[in-house]
Image (cartoon, helix red, strand yellow):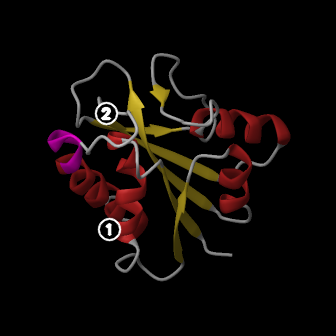
Amino acid sequence: MSETVVIGVGNLDRGDDAAGRRVAAALRDTVPSGTLVMESDGDPAAIMDAWKGADRAVLVDAMVSGSPPGTVRRFDATTTPLPIAVHFVSSHGMGAAEAIEMARTLGRMPTRLLVYGIEGSRFRHGEPMSPSVNDAVEVARGMVMAEVAGVGD
């Protein structure tokens, strides 16, 4: 297994919900050796399986927290639950936040878990990604790239 796994979560057909997967797609061919990049539709079991055996997991997903669309926030979920006021978007009814807490309960957490949330506003089926979230995909890509490359460690 890779030392680090980056998991972009989302639904490509639901506007801003595609943000996490778009970040993963932009990173796929540029990450350092030892980093695996994956995309997920948000199924909690699939997310837990994706980080199984990884030392570090970086999860990227769309969120709704009341911040302006396009805001990118970083959370360290290694030992602390994600803030209650931050909702990660899922078409499954359960998504990234639920996967994290389920993994915590089951003892299936990676050694380190970082979550990048991109604030969205358009989530209906068939909607295009909003311009501010489209711009934020590149911002988040740069932040995650710096994270996996060890910049600032």
Residue of label 1: 26
Relative height, residue 41 to residue 125 (above, below)? below
Relative height, residue 117 to residue 134 (above, below)? above
Judging from the image, what secondary structure is the residue with disc 1 in?
A: helix
Which comes before the other along the chain, label 2 or label 1? 1
From the viewer's perspective, is 99 left or right of 35?
right
User: Can see residue 153?
Assistant: no
**In this view, which residue lies farthest toward the front?**
126
Residue at left offset 48%, top offset 33%: 89
Task: Look at the image and give the residue range highlighted in magenta.
Answer: 130-134
Depth check: 8 or 127 in front? 127
Residue 65: x percent and y percent? 37, 21
What is the chief secondary structure element of the magenta stretch? helix
Q: CA distance from mark 2 to mark 1?
A: 18 Å
Residue of label 2: 120
User: Can see residue 36?
Assistant: yes
Residue at left offset 48%, top offset 83%: 33
Mark 2: amino acid = Gly
State the count of labels: 2
